[in-house]
Image (cartoon, coloured by chain):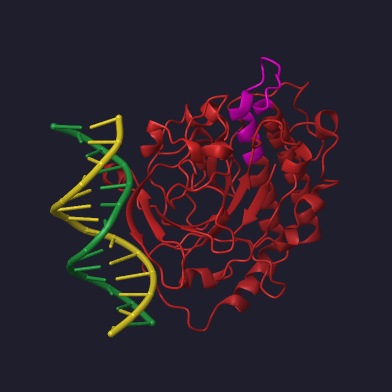
Chain colours: A red, B green, C yellow
Amino acid sequence: MALIATGATATATAAPVASPAASSMASELMAQGRESAAVLEALLHGASLPPAHGGAHALAAEILRCCDRALAALRAGGDAESSSADTKRKPATAQPSTRRRRRYIYMYVSSRSCDGARDRAATQQEIFCRATASGGGAAAAAEPARVEKARTSEDGFLWRKYGQKEIKNSKHPRLYYRCSYKDDHGCTATKQVQQSEEDPSLYVITYFGDHTCSCQTAAAAAMDDDDDDENSQHFVINFGPATASRSGSPPLLYDDGDDGDVWRETAATPPSSRQSRCSPEGDGEESGVKMSKEEPVDSCPGPSAVSSPADVVSCSSPAMEPDLLGCLNWDDDFGDSSFVDADEFMNFDEIDLFQIYS
DNA sequence: GTCATTTGACCTCA
DNA sequence: TGAGGTCAAATGAC
């Protein structure tokens, strides 16, 4: 399983550093989130869970919640530092912009292996914290919001492509998407997708504006409730597959059922690929790997819609809040984790506290 | 026929 | 003036 945290600033001089307490809390939360991710993966591999369990959808929600809280903890513990760092990062040439600029961190969790037999340890190996070109804080207000290197452009929202542009000194064109509900709901959200120069299997995704529509997956919906804070911070956890591009375009995700291999999407594109669906009840459950999420990290998403049974779900930390009980018992279920601890799992010190700007 | 995508043209800004 | 972003007519898929 790969988890990629992008849009993060890794430079020593620019990255805000969360307090040790915040890092500890965040590490714990992220560890729990990872537990759920591992169970989700197992589920997608065909493992059965107790009937009372909510399935992939619920697991994804738990993962998102854990990550959300972890990031919230980080921000809570690192605001002072980040503010300082942001000030330092702010370029002198910051330019005013009337556009709303939202900067996300993009976390990719592959919940399905390439061929079903893929070694789990191998799938749990990656985490990248990459620096954004613009850094965070006030600098981002003057430069395009940016999300770097996701393996799919899928994020749970329904986008409509409205343009494509060859970019100078770039091998790959930049694709322009706006929310498909722009006309219906006046949703101003747009995004730009460009294939990474360094790794064509990754896509640099830049988000602009806010989703004012309700077009999102259940996972997205579950966490969008608190997305009314203009200054809230967001990240995206994308359970979509790593797919190869099709004609240079970002992969379109689709329901592959239980037998499809979303990591090998290149061979066949389903008819439905023309449009990502916007079914809160469908996307996440159908594939279990397409759920993406925009989440204000300083919010407290409500309890998961699906409760988790104690025999599958437990909370390894008594300090966790009740609604974190959905996190799975790592030791019981996935004691062979390739991650020794959460700190190994994610270097929080390298994660920028990507803020939302307007 | 409807709707999403394509793509050249146009607009804005530095 | 060039680069990037958006528009909108043309095109194609369903």
Q: Indicate the quadrant containing the C terminus of chain A: top left, top right, bottom left or bottom right.
A: bottom left
Farthest top residue? A51
Q: Position of residue A278 (x, y in %)?
A: 41, 34
Point out the residue furthest to the front here.
Answer: A267
State the extent of the magenta-drawn residues as a range: A43-64
Q: Is residue A98 left or right of residue A36?
A: left
Location of residue A320 with respect to A58 vertically, above or below: below
**Foreground residue, A182 or A23?**
A182
Residue at image coords 76%, 37%: A119
- Front residue (pair A54, A299): A54
Q: Quadrant of the N terminus of chain A?
A: top right
Q: Can residue A45 be found in the magenta stretch?
A: yes
Position of A275 with respect to A229 (left or right) is left
Q: Position of residue A267 (x, y in %)?
A: 49, 37
Determine the residue positioned at 82% across, 43% down.
A338
Q: Residue A120, located in which quarter of the rendered image?
A: top right
Do we see residue A67 in this rendering? yes
* Relative vertical location of residue A187 with respect to residue A81 in this rendering, above or below: above
Viewer can see residue A277: no
Looking at the rendered structure, the number of numbered marks drawn on it comes to 0
- Name the quadrant containing residue A306: top right
* Residue A162 on the magenta segment: no
| A351 on left or right of A253 | right
Say if A82 sits above or below A318 in the image: below
User: Which residue is pictured at 49% across the width and 48% down the height?
Assistant: A245
Give the percent coordinates (x, y) of residue C1. 28, 85
Q: Position of residue A174 (x, y in %)?
A: 41, 61
Q: Residue at x 80, y 40 (%)?
A: A319
Q: Nearer the viewer, residue C3 or A170?
A: A170
Quarter of the figure with residue A33? top right
